Amino acid sequence: MQFRNTSSLVGLAFVALISLTGIWDTKAQSDEAVEVKLLKAGNGWSLSRAGEPHRIQGAGGTASLEVLAGLGANSTRTWGIDQLDEGRLDEAARNGLTVAVGIWLRHDLDYADEKQVDEQIRLALEGVRKYKDHPAVLVWGIGNEMEGAGDNPAVWKHIETIAKLVKREDPLHPTMTVIAEIGGEKVKNLHHLCHHIDIVGINAYGGAESLPKRYRAAGGAKPYIVTEFGPRGPWDLPKNAIGSVDEEVGSVKAETYLKSFQAVSADRQLCLGSYAFKWGHKQEATPTWFGMLLADGRKTPVVDVLSKEWFGRAPANLCPQIDSLKLVPGRTVKVGATMKATLDAHDPEKQPLKVQWVLMEDAKSHYTGGYFQETPPTYKELILKTSSEEVTFRAPKKPGLYRIFAYVGDGQGSVDAANIVFRAEE
């Protein structure tokens, strides 16, 4: 998944999240580079940092690293050098986290244009020189999903050129490049043409659980990091009867994250760890599809299951769970028609629940290539009557696809969310 723009997160649940797991380990900081080694023992690989084993369990995104560390993570990931300009490495170091530092490579680069190629190399090395001595740096992530189908040798040769120069500038940190899944000849070409790439970064969603087996079948021998895993994306799911895609409810997503994490964590031979996506909020397909947090900072069920895996115990306060969300009269209605949605939800601690209902236009595209979208328009004025069990609302007068969202919060910084898409017709 590509990642360029970020959104500012001021988490309303900041204090609540910290209190869920007690304290975190803030390791002693230094002002010098910490050596990271890629170690091979027999057929197995591992990372060591300052002589100690360092198996990655983390998340990528822009939300608070203090909160992330408090949940038991030990690392985070960025996508571009520009994401470090506001002290992200310092924030990581203060909280005992390492950083897989991303070096953004253009997806539209003309590899026949020497000026473009040279400029990209210059910028990459400039970033390495600027940050290579920071103690939080773990690995250099050279590019993210810029390989396309993976069949252009010029892409791999360019990555190899940058990797070779990066290793010359900084021999203390391994190099990595990140690919979108492992289809086609990606794994083969990366192994054959990128000898100075130490680690393969792989972004995998619906296929993450089977990745260890598939990577080997594709000829993978280099160690790898699962640089993004998360819910099943719109590309993983079938279209529904009205030509849209149904988003899975939070508890179902959490189970997908859990199975993916456990599957790749069990691969102690080639897998060096993983980064969940996304630590923060993102509008992509919907406002709730990929974020581990909502825009206001409240945590979703995904945080609960991963914190249990990272920290060894579940948070004290668990998220509510939506059991069902149903639409009356159905998926297709006349423009301006009055509709209802009914909700069944519960809270593990039996706390009283507050439900927020939002009517929103469906995104014009569910497949963004990872880029942020503009948040679609909402229709607050069409919400007629609400309760914690149902909402009565009117379909917009403009034909098209819309979603009705239910946000179920416990007042303690935890939430579950679900939505149903419908079509309004003349």
Image: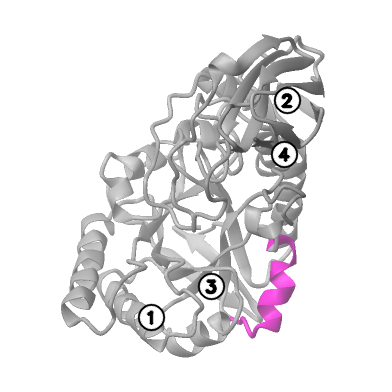
Q: Which is more foreground, mark 1 or mark 3? A: 1
Q: Amino acid at mark 4?
A: Val
Q: Secondary structure at mark 4?
A: helix
Distance, label 1 to label 3, CA atoms, is 28 Å
Relative height, residue 372 to residue 424 (above, below)? below
Q: Which residues are magenta?
A: 208-221
Question: Residue 378: percent from the left, percent from the top?
Answer: 52, 26
Disc 2: which residue = 318
Question: Residue 344: percent from the left, percent from the top?
Answer: 83, 22
Distance, label 1 to label 2, CA atoms, is 45 Å
Disc 4: which residue = 305
For the point 37% across and 68% down, the residue is 107
Q: Please give the label number shown on residue 155.
A: 1
Residue 362 versus residue 21: which sits nearer the camera?
362
Instruction: Count neighbours of disc 4 (C-alpha within 10 A) and say few if under 14, some if 14 to 19, many if 20 or more.
Output: many
Contact (CB < 8 A) between labels 1 and 3? no
The residue furthest bottom is: 192
For the point 34% across and 61% down, the residue is 104
The residue furthest front is: 426
Q: Which is more foreground, mark 3 or mark 2? A: 2
Contact (CB < 8 A) between labels 3 and 2? no
Q: Amino acid at mark 1?
A: Val
Residue 100 versus residue 335: which sits nearer the camera?
335
* Res. 294 in view: yes
Question: Residue 91: percent from the left, percent from the top?
Answer: 37, 37
